[in-house]
Amino acid sequence: MLPSFYDNWKHVFKLDPERPIDDATLDAICTSGTDAILVGGSSGVTFDNTVDLMARIRRYEVPCAFELSDPACGVPGFDGYFIPSVINTKHTEWLIGHHVEALRDFGHLLPWDLITGEAYLVLNPESTVAKVSRAETNISNEEAIAYSQVADRLWNVPVLYVEYSGVFGDMALLKSIKSGLKQAHLFYGGGISSPELAAQAAASADTVVVGNIIYENLDAALATVNAVNLAIKEQDHVF
Ligand code: 1GP
């Protein structure tokens, strides 16, 4: 498999184009030592607010990728693009339907070398992404693991994203999901509001995604960067 732009990401800050962020906060985030900035949101993302945010992030050296969920927001100039699908929904437009329409109309324009498919397992029923995609979040751990393995082993998705957006997830389940993967790179996001929680997620996920806390408690958000790096060093030391 070719190396991918996200292979070495341990910690990522996720910024929502719809949410205002002042220059000082953006500066702190972009110079924090995080491995990348991921731009994306479940609602209110437009071409204009994405361009605005990307242009501001581009003043920094930190890599910057975009979760492209609407072709109308296909802003060029990111280092990489993730195209998400929700795997635990019965409403197939979120699994494949929108994607087919987008590729039919825009596939010839896409920078394929920079694009990665991203399979979302959405597990917080209160999150916007769960509501929009009508994800089936009330599933057993065995089903969650099975969904992950369908994505990883049958479909060979490059990235599996365990998404608890807004709440901290079940770390025992995350660990079981990780141990059942054959090849997918595992993202975890949701409710990381302290260095301790970031370290717990880093014990299983390949990449830890920190979002909301940026807008609520910048110091706590910044502290997650070192926490993830330290947790990984400790794991390497132990094993
Ligand atoms: C959201 O997974 C990310 O898509 C991060 O979640 O906002 O809860 O940190 P939080």
Image: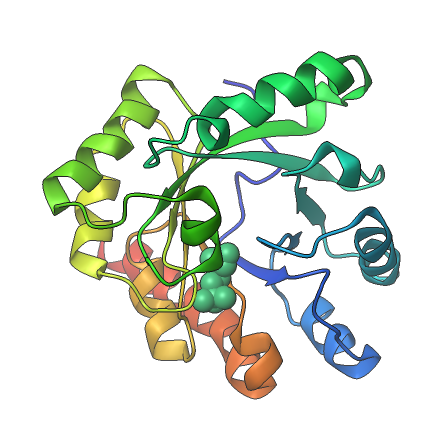
The percent position of residue 183, horizontal first and vertical second, equals 35, 27
**Horizontal and vertical percent position of residue 69:** 63, 38
Image check: 28 left or right of 205? right
Q: Quadrant of residue 4?
A: top right
The structure residue drawn at horizontal position 29% and vertical position 58%, both measured from the top left corner, is: 203
User: In the image, is residue 70 above or below residue 24?
Assistant: above
Is 102 or 153 nearer to us in this picture? 102
Percent coordinates x, y for residue 11 in the rendering: 51, 59
The image shows residue 157 at horizontal and vertical percentages of 42, 25
- Given residues 152 and 124, the one toward you in this image is 124
Nearest the viewer among 227 and 175 is: 175
User: Is any part of residue 67 visible from this angle?
Assistant: yes
- The residue nearer to you, when weighing 146 against 104, is 104
90 displayed left or right of 32: left
Residue at 59 percent across and 23 percent down: it is 99
* Residue 18 in which image quadrant: bottom right
User: What residue is rendered at 73% in x and 56% in y?
Assistant: 62
